[in-house]
Image (spheres, helix red, strand yellow):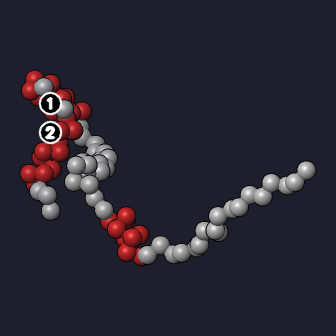
Amino acid sequence: MSAKKIQIGMKPTNKAISPSADAWVETRKNPDEPEAMKRLTIDVPASLHRMIKSSCAMRGTKIADEVRELLLQKYGNQ
């Protein structure tokens, strides 16, 4: 009975990935993806919260959207 010989391909090399490729991966941005969001927590008096909540409910908007708009008006897209 003869042994079957199997040829194995070449050993992969340990070529270093170019730094420019790593930099590209780390800095690439997809213009179709929305910007990442961060959570902001603030404390407001209960009476102010009631006024904001009822006003938003009457307009059919969310408090977060209203606050985001106010912050953009104040600070813009700097």
Image quarter of residue 10: bottom right
Q: Residue at x 17, y 45 (%)?
A: 68
Q: Secondary structure at mark 2?
A: helix
Q: Could you tell me residue 15's position as x and y percent? A: 54, 75
Rendered position, 49 above or below 1: above
Crowd around label 1: few <14 · some 14–19 · many ≥20 (10 Å):
few
Nearest the eye: 54 or 19 = 19
Q: Residue at x 85, y 55 (%)?
A: 3
- Residue wearing tag 1: 61
Q: Could you tell me residue 16's position as x and y percent? A: 51, 75
Q: Is residue 52 left or right of residue 14?
A: left
- Residue wearing tag 2: 66
Nearest the eye: 57 or 2 = 2
Q: Residue at x 39, y 70 (%)?
A: 21
Image quarter of residue 25: bottom left
Nearest the eye: 8 or 29 = 8
Q: Could you tell me residue 14's position as x and y percent? A: 58, 73
Rendered position, 68 above or below 78: above
Q: Secondary structure at mark 1?
A: loop
Residue type for callout 1: Thr
Q: Residue at x 21, y 54 (%)?
A: 31
Q: Earlier in the sequence, mark 1 or mark 2?
A: 1
Q: Is residue 37 left or right of residue 7?
A: left
Tag 1 near tag 2, CB within 8 Å: yes
